[in-house]
Amino acid sequence: MKTTINRKEILVLSVIIVLAVYFFCISLKYTHIGIYAEQNQNGDWTVTRVLNSVSWASVNQIEPGDNINKINGEDPSQFKKLIKFGKVEMVDSLVIKQQNGIEIVYKSPSYNQSQIEYVIIPMLVFFLLLHISIFIYKKQGIKSDTRLLVSFSIMCALTYATTGATSRYNEVGELVLSFSYPILPVLLLHYLYRYFSIRGEKFIAFWIIKMGYIIILIHAVIVAVYLVSPIFNYKIYTYIIINSYSSIFILYSLFTFVISVYRYLKGNPAYRPVYKIILLGLVTSFFPFIFFVGIPDILFGIYLMPYQFAIMFAIFMPIMYLYLLSANQLIDIDYILKRVRYYWILAVIPTVFIMVIIYLIWDIDSTNIVKCFETYMVIHIALVLFLYIKENLDYRLSALWFKEKHHFQNSMNEFTQQLSKMMNTSELEAAMIKTLKSVLPIGSVILLEKPLNESCVVKEKLGSLPNPSIFAQINNSADHTAVGHFIPVDSGICFLYGNTGNCGRMVWFDNKVNHTRFNRDEVSWIKTLLSYVAIVFENFQLIDDFIGNLEQNMSQDKNRPAWLLRLLFSISENERRRLSSDLHDTVLQDQIVLYRQLEQLLKESNIPRHVQDQMQLIHDGLIDVIGKIREACNELRPPFLKELGIVEAINKLLSQLKLRNSVEFYAADFQAELDDDQVITIYRIVQELLQNANKHAQASQINLMLSNTEDAIYFTYTDNGIGMDLKKLEYSLTHMGLWGIQERVASLEGTIHFHSTPGEGFLVEISIPLQNSVGIHQ
């Protein structure tokens, strides 16, 4: 991955840094005056608007209606910035006559708080974003989507660096801002287009992005023409040019937001978490500027938030998308949004209350809507951050500060660990009593049993019995209480944790010995513990019922349910698989290592001849042992049985078995797809029949036939051996391998028929339904 920066990129980065340094120097050299002015009918220049509270005009209480007498010692009409932009900035001296007749004189330099807002903060933000850009290069390499993300980050940095220069209406700053500011949402849209294109997802048509770049280029050219032309009409610049690039920024930002919402609702569900992060980044980075600066300025000529602070939110965008590029697992954005929404609503009333107190104590002008809104937002956001930080600190530090809560968590962990070792309800009840006594300061714990419509009886007692009135309340309410719920009593706590038949099982324990109420943490812990007990108790009951049914079915020789047979054979096959794996991975590998070591020793020439002969015998014996272990592993669990298919698996079995008979296998028309149970069942049946024939049948010819219809599998076995008396077969069925075949067929709800007489051979016909099979190849 390429991570080095080429010369062109270094040159562009150098130009951006030089521009940023130039803008910071402009901000340091000239004080932010903050005056808009117009020429009245008398030819005098009058203040029409004073910008934010940190400007020189605002600090010196310049107000709309005051006259501008001199700029740089000359008539204001000679000052080009005033005529071209309608604003007083970058002056060396200024004389203003207020409406009360007092003259205010300004001489450069005059440092105030504006240096912090327009120099120090922009400088910090610029280098932070520059550092983020370099980090993205090193982290992700120079790819197409990474370049766009880095370009976005650098444009954010450059835009923020121009804030000081553009507030002073420096021509270079105005030109840079004319493209660096409106290009941000277009770059973001281009980045998202590339991000999803790389991943094979459609986001938007590329011509929309091209159109954005063309519009911004045209806009920048218009700004450049106006800045160098002899046209001096500040209304054209203020109301058309400035509002135009604010409009471009707003429209493309909102368009990106709408497209992201649409793709979130209609696009690939797998990318919904990604779209949520995109939407969060858009709202966090762009919406403060759009709704608190851009739209209010276009419509009403006011800022609801200082624009240099609104732009600062754009920092979150490259950080968020860097996370999107580099994170292996995305954060649970739904959880974060729910928490922020909850804190935002929770902070409304306290914010209003704090604002009322502030305005009453400090006698602030409540008619200034902009100031009220700014104050409200600052307090509200501060409270939301405070609540979020508090919750995280509570989570991290509560174990240190609240020992009891930590003790509850530990006791619950210990109890849940004990659950895995419990074998019956008696052990569960003993552990419950022990845990209750060790954690809570209580004196008595009693286990109760209550038969339906009868009085409860004490099953186990630790401590003193409750009052008779408590027993009466339990008797009245227990029959109508569901398992896992509390029974209302006047003293102590009673909980119904299980049922055995028609008998309810309850636990009662008294109040704390220090005569205080159970606190919130204790009540929560009690509910959790007893809910666990109820769930585990019910599971023990289900297991007991299952074992009872299993024992009942196992005690019967006939009509065993198919599910039980499948379970038993599944357990058997799993054990065979485990044993085969153990043999292959341990014993067989050890034998192979010994065999290879012995081979190396036999190659030594200095070993006596008689020792070599003995070693050769051991060597040959090891080969036989290795072969037998491999045969045993294959018999226990034939390899690739499912992958080969039943027909190929039977052919392979026939080639491996050393039979004294001639065997013909017919399966040309077999086309059914079998599940695992069917494959292993047929394979084991063939294996058993062939072994029986080899040992007992004395047959010279064996025929196997496998076929199917749409509804069933049919298997037929015939041989010309000595046959058998079927009456004797029935009498000794449970002691023969044929009984295992019969049980395997029954496990798949199939049928099996044996046909044989002494001296006439042996015939087996098997039919297995295909209702569980995958289907039939056409």
Image: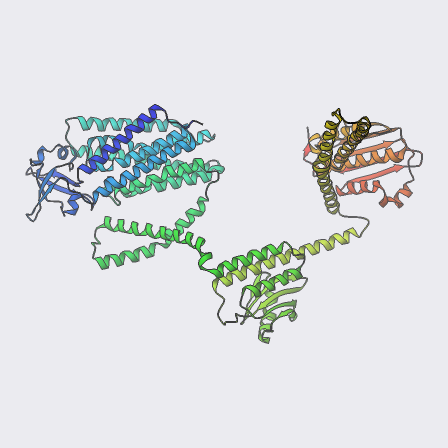
From the viewer's side, name the closer residue of 219 and 134: 134
Quarter of the image for the C terminus: give it: top right
In the image, 375: left or right of 495?
left
Residue at x 49%, y 37% (from the top left corner): 270
Q: Residue 660 falls in which quadrant of the image?
A: top right
Above or below residue 444? Residue 371 is: above
Whether residue 300 is visible, yes or no, is no
In the image, 499: left or right of 219?
right
Residue at x 19%, y 28% (from the top left corner): 226
Q: How many marks?
A: 0
Above or below residue 485? Residue 323 is: above
Q: Residue 457 falls in which quadrant of the image?
A: bottom right
State the image coordinates of residue 223 (x, y, percent, origin top left): 22, 29
Above or below residue 678? Residue 452 is: below
Q: Residue furthest bottom?
A: 468
Whether residue 466 is visible, yes or no, is yes
From the viewer's side, name the closer residue of 426 and 113: 113
Quarter of the image for the N terminus: give it: top left
